[in-house]
Image (spheres, rainbow, N blue to C red):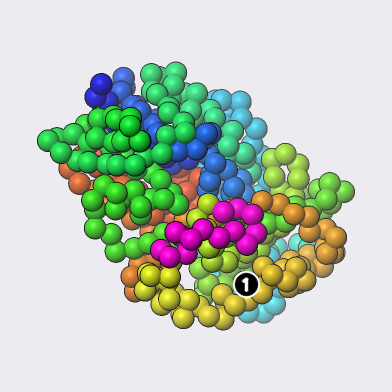
Amino acid sequence: MTHDVIIIGGGIVGLATALAVLEKRPGAGILLLEKEAGLARHQTGHNSGVIHAGIYYAPGSLKARLCREGAEAITVFCAEHAIPFETCGKLVVATDALEASRMDALFERAQTNGIAVEKLDAAELRRREPAIEGVGAILVHATGIVDYKAVCAAMAAELTRQGGTIELGTEVTAIQEKDGLVTVAAGERRWTAAKLIACAGLQSDRLARLAGLAIEHRIVPFRGEYYRLPPARNTIVRHLIYPVPDPALPFLGIHLTRMIDGSVTVGPNAVLGLAREGYPKLSVDLRDMIDLATFPGLWRLLAANIGSGTQELANSLWKRGYLAACRKYCPALTLDDLRPMEAGIRAQAVMADGRLEHDFLFLQTEHMLHVCNAPSPAATSSIPIGRMIADRCFGAG
């Protein structure tokens, strides 16, 4: 049997893409392949559950537009499918004069992006969040929280309702584009399709190479290590609490996040992972280590970020250092408050020159499209990202 489209990857981008294809081509025969025994087992199922408003992105940029559109689309989808979500708002907290100046620039960017924000002084910050200390903050009203695994379950149900097929426990071992079709193999099983879309996240570079494509990047796994606060601390904040980002660093820093189940998490940090899918601490995968060690771009990246990388590693290994980063704006936290929680792993495309790819990275042939980098916040932006991928495959008409 020949399908219209085969999609590899059962995370939120793969599922949203499947629905976008059906939106564009109603009745299309879609087969979604996922190597794990369930959906959303990797990046989607290990993120912080935040519906981002998009204040960090350059005005007019694709990421800014997709984030705004995605936040609206996710909340509409949740309302239509009875998925709990909450628009609780986020506070970006400045703790000194330097951060305050960066906060002012961020405030102006948010206003240019058309995002509803409010500037708070220290007294108003303390009134709204008694456990948080700072010289000021930006309140981002539209930020929300949701369980993205629940979103994926609803997307999967909608996909099957519209006639799509999902095959779990199906690890792709071969891809061949020939004679106007793409053949995909998983062991002894074979499928053919007119189009292949690969949304493979942590394995996306390997899927591209498997398909015979030349790549100039590697997926470098960055572990985001979290702690969960004890239930007695679940009311410590009413909003999400973020630090003001340092423009010299690639990640947002450790923050306090309210979860849709009522719990509160602290994190993540960002440390180099030695296993793409190794979630327990100190996980090692020999194949992944060899892949990293033989990629010159990694060494260039490490050399350019030696200071911040060393600090992140130190905080990973030394719990008191991690706590100090949290206590900078939430001094009430103690070591006993930091309870173990499974890490997340971010699939970060790194180029051969050591540059972190912060934009979308697609590799496309006549019959295949490989999503090699879907930048954060991909979960928030997943529905418009899916539509953008469908447009690239079938045209925008």
Toward which corner of the image does residue 7 lie, by quadrant?
top left
- The residue under the point 29% across, 49% down is 210
Residue 360 is inside the magenta segment: no
Toward which corner of the image does residue 223 lie, by quadrant?
bottom right
User: Taking the image as drawn, is residue 256 in sight?
Assistant: no
Residue 287 is inside the magenta segment: yes
User: In the displayed structure, does residue 156 sit left or right of residue 245?
Assistant: left
Picture layout, residue 319 above or below residue 345: below
Where are the magenta residues, as a range? 278-291
- The residue under the point 70% across, 77% down is 96
Picture layout, residue 245 above or below residue 158: below
Q: Position of residue 336 (x, y in %)?
A: 85, 60
Q: Amino acid at mark 1?
A: Leu
Is 204 in front, or is 289?
289
Specify the farthest residue to the right.
232
Picture layout, residue 359 above or below residue 86: below
User: Taking the image as drawn, is residue 189 in sight?
Assistant: yes
Category of crowding for the residue at label 1, using alpha-carbon neighbours closer than 10 angstroms: few (below 14), some (14–19), many (at least 20): some
Q: Regarding mark 1 in the picture, which secondary structure is present there?
A: helix
Toward which corner of the image does residue 81 lie, by quadrant?
top right
- The residue under the point 78% across, 65% down is 330
Is 32 in front, or is 385?
32
User: In the displayed structure, does residue 47 sit left or right of residue 64?
Assistant: right
User: In the displayed structure, does residue 122 sit left or right of residue 3?
Assistant: right
- The residue labelled by disc 1 is 313
